[in-house]
Image: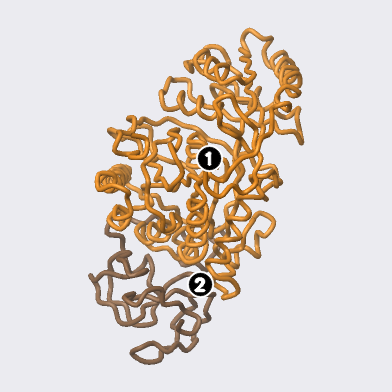
Chain colours: A orange, B brown
Amino acid sequence: MTNSAPLSGYLRADGRKGIRNTILVAYLVECAHFVASKIVAGFDGEDVQLIGFPGCYPNEYAAQMMEKLCTHPNVGGVLFVSLGCESFDKVRVSDAVSASGRPVKTLVIQKAGGTAGTVDLGRTWVRDVMAEVMAVERVPMAMDELIIGTICGGSDGTSGISGNPAAGKAFDLLVAQGAACIFEETGELIGCEDIMAERAVTPELGQLLRESVHKAERYYATLGYGSFAAGNAAGGLSTIEEKSLGAYVKSGDSQISGILKPGDVPPTGGLYLMDVVPDGDVRFGFPNISDNAEIVEMIASGAHVTLFVTGRGSVVGSAISPVIKICANPDTYRALAGDMDVNAGAIIEGLKTIDDIGQEIHDLVVSVSNGAQSKSEALGHREFILTYKTFEPAGPACLPAAG
Amino acid sequence: MIGPFLLLHEKDTILVARATVAQGTKIDLEQGPVDLPQAIPLAHKIARHDILSGTKILKYGMPIGIATADIPAGAHVHVHNMRSAYTPTHMLQDADGVSSGVSK
């Protein structure tokens, strides 16, 4: 165990520790979304959160993601809301949550008295288990038990100069303390594959890093668009490779220890690339239709906190794990200060260094892990999205430390 | 640093604006002073020196695309005069970084 900064966490039966103790209400098809949201609406100001999967057709990726999310260490209990005729395997997911030692209940709207009856039963169940969930033991937690993700969204020409290098510096500090840090996404590393491969802990992993980016390149070429939104261009980014080079630096300078697919939990501390682009033929559309899809995938891999670097100015948070918002653009910071945790734009204005802001981000990770609310969390942001994808399991060369 | 512009890497062919820079601002480039022909928004790019059509544009010392026109030193370098070597860039009416991208 390395540097054990004094965190405290909620101890779960599998030995993992959470920094939050959330009750999830999860709808298993869009047809149950409204009823689930009505149940959550009965708990304003309490830590009861809505997640769900909209599709009526089965998908192994979505089934696995839902299991991982509902057994995330930040989660204390789960209520599933089913319409009744959708294809999602509610017995399998409920059994997985039950086996993890958490209270779980499934309500089927068609058998529970429709909208009003299900809302009543759901609110009663959540109220009844709250005391049990709150009684979970809090124990000391070391920095090497933390998993931190990073993404950038609403990027502009400042992201690669201030916010992303500062997030990379924070990652270097966290990795040195034994934490597991996850960066993504391969569609925004196009043009960086060779410099990234040189940082792999083994030559085989380096080759797999290259291949993951080439897969993303083929996937996006088929779709006809890069991972590039119109606002990126307005913010001064001219091409996907310019955006990629700016995004790449948020990985910092540490060696790369492995490649994760969404839902794979890092086996040790260190720096990991998450491969978010589906395997096989292009199916189901864009790999990540908006920033929250990537945030959810890192949470499924155990992320306790996500660092979100923005230039244009995203305001999102997330269900399950808090989001720390790092604003790269000083003008955006002034316009949206109420949504931003860190003003990395001060680097561009010459008021702070990349090291200063990197340390500030690191310290904020520690305080948020100890219960302080991030800005988006305090504002009540709990965005969530889960859609269809297909993945093959990661091979052993992706995670040399696990072997 | 070159006035209000940043040189991110010695090999770069572009400079990045540290703040929005007004049209007509005099910038001392290596091949001589230029008056900015147009306002450059924060984090947008200008040509560090004359760039020939078809050549690579370098930022962070790395290629970020290919010039689609001859670009004189000091001119805005963006989606109107460069392209990706990978996938086309999607843009809307606000790509110049000045207009707000909503109908009047």
| CA–CA distance in space, label 2 to label 1 | 36 Å
Q: Quadrant of residue A245?
A: bottom left
Q: Nearer the viewer, mark 2 or mark 1?
A: 1
Do marks 2 and 1 share a subunit?
no
The image position of residue A7, as x and y in percent, is 64, 44
Circle 1: element type: loop
Taking the spot 33% from the left edge, 40% from the top edge, the residue there is A400
Residue B50 visible within the image: yes
Front residue (pair A73, B91): A73
Front residue (pair A248, B75): A248
Circle 2: element type: loop
Taking the spot 33% from the left edge, 64% from the top edge, the residue there is B64
Q: Which residue is mark 1?
A: A303
The image position of residue A293, as x and y in percent, is 49, 39
Disc 2, disc 1: CB below 8 Å? no
Q: Determine whether A64 is above or below A99 in the image.
A: below
Circle 2 Cα neighbour tier, 10 Å, few/some/many (<14 / 14–19 / ≥20): many
Q: Determine whether A260 is above or below A349 in the image.
A: above
Q: Quadrant of the C terminus of chain A?
A: top left
Taking the spot 49% from the left edge, 78% from the top edge, the residue there is B39
Q: Quadrant of residue A131?
A: top right
Q: In the image, what residue type sits under mark 1? A: Ala
Task: Give the left or right position of residue B79, taking residue A373 as reference.
Answer: left
Q: Which mark is residue A166?
A: none
Circle 1 Cα neighbour tier, 10 Å, few/some/many (<14 / 14–19 / ≥20): many
Q: Which residue is mark 2?
A: B41
